[in-house]
Each structure stands twice: as structure tokens, then as C-alpha cells.
Image (tube, rainbow, N blue to C red):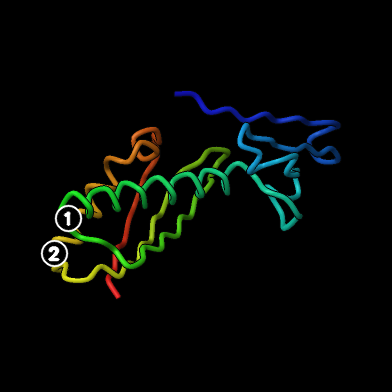
Amino acid sequence: MKRTATAVWSGTIKEGSGHLTTDSNVLNQTPYSFHSRFEDGAGTNPEELLAAAHAGCFTMKLIANLSEAGYTPDEIMTDCHISMANGKMSKSELEVKARVPGIPEHEFHQLAQDAEKNCPVSKAFAFEITMTAQLY
């Protein structure tokens, strides 16, 4: 399986801009720029896209773990924060809140820890990953 995205950029790093498009067209000439990456400009940036990828992948792995253990979650919400320091991505922080009927808290945490370590995006990252998990 391969997934594809295309980046197009015109101009200098600070004055120029670009756009991103994916095969699925979920991103369809979505703007990005120096300002959207390092300031508060409109558009997306690589860190935001990595955060979305990690939140989505972790959540799907957690759902798979819960399903295999015989639980059906009512809802799982995962926030992901990607940090950048000294010109490189340095940390991914996952914060998951879940409503899972009937699951003991210790078992939920065990399944969440497995998802943190074993989702494909976690395995691809070479930087620190942290995770907090909470039932509500």
C-alpha cells in the first residue's frame, strides 16, 4: 500500500507559499507557508499534519485493541501535540480521553500503552512520545 501527497512551492522561504494535495483530495491545494509554520498565518504545516497522523493512527490502534479485548468504545478523543526544537521535531504528546463501557481502568491503560508503542506512526517516529489516558 502506498499513499501519496504532493507539495508545490513558489518563491522564497519567507515571502513564498505553497500548497499540499493528497490523492484522496482531503487536502486539495491546501495552503502552507513560513507564516503558517512558524507564526500564526493561515494554512497548515508539517507539524500539524504529523499531529493529525499520529492522533488518527493511535486512536485506530487503541480501537483495535479494545475491540480485540471485547469492548466497544462509545467515544475516543485523542489530541496530539508535536513539538519542534532546534530545527527538528522533538516530541509527540498524545492525550486520550475515552468512554468505554465496562472496562476496568487498569486494562484501559494497558491497552492505551500498547497503542502508543505499536501504532505504525509511533513506530516511524524517532523522537520522544508521551501519552496520558483518561476514562470519562
Q: Dot 1 corresponds to which residue? A: 110
Residue type at mark 1: give it.
Gln
Q: Dot 2 corresponds to which residue? A: 106
Query: Are the residues flagged by discs 1 and 2 in contact, CB closer than 8 Å?
Result: yes
Q: Secondary structure at mark 1?
A: helix
Q: Residue at x 75, y 39 (%)?
A: 29
Q: Residue at x 49, y 24 (%)?
A: 2
Q: Which mark is residue 66?
A: none
Q: Is residue 100 left or right of residue 123?
A: left
Q: Residue 64 location in percent, x, y? A: 27, 48
Q: Secondary structure at mark 2?
A: helix
Q: Residue at x 70, y 37 (%)?
A: 20
Q: Residue 3 location in percent, x, y? A: 53, 28
| Image mark count | 2
Q: Quadrant of the C terminus?
A: bottom left
Rendered position, 87 above or below 103? above
Rendered position, 22 above or below 103? above
Q: Residue 108 location in percent, x, y? A: 19, 61
Disc 1 to disc 2, C-alpha distance: 6 Å
Q: Is residue 41 left or right of residue 116?
A: right
Question: Which of the 4 quarters of the picture holds residue 76?
Answer: bottom left
Q: Residue at x 22, y 71 (%)?
A: 101
Residue type at mark 2: give it.
His
Residue found at the very far bottom of the displayed protein? 136
Q: Quadrant of the N terminus?
A: top left
Say few, some or many: other residues with alpha carbon within 10 Å of mark 2 (under 14 / 14 to 19 / 20 or more): few
Say few, some or many: other residues with alpha carbon within 10 Å of mark 1 (under 14 / 14 to 19 / 20 or more): few
Q: Residue 58 location in percent, x, y? A: 36, 48
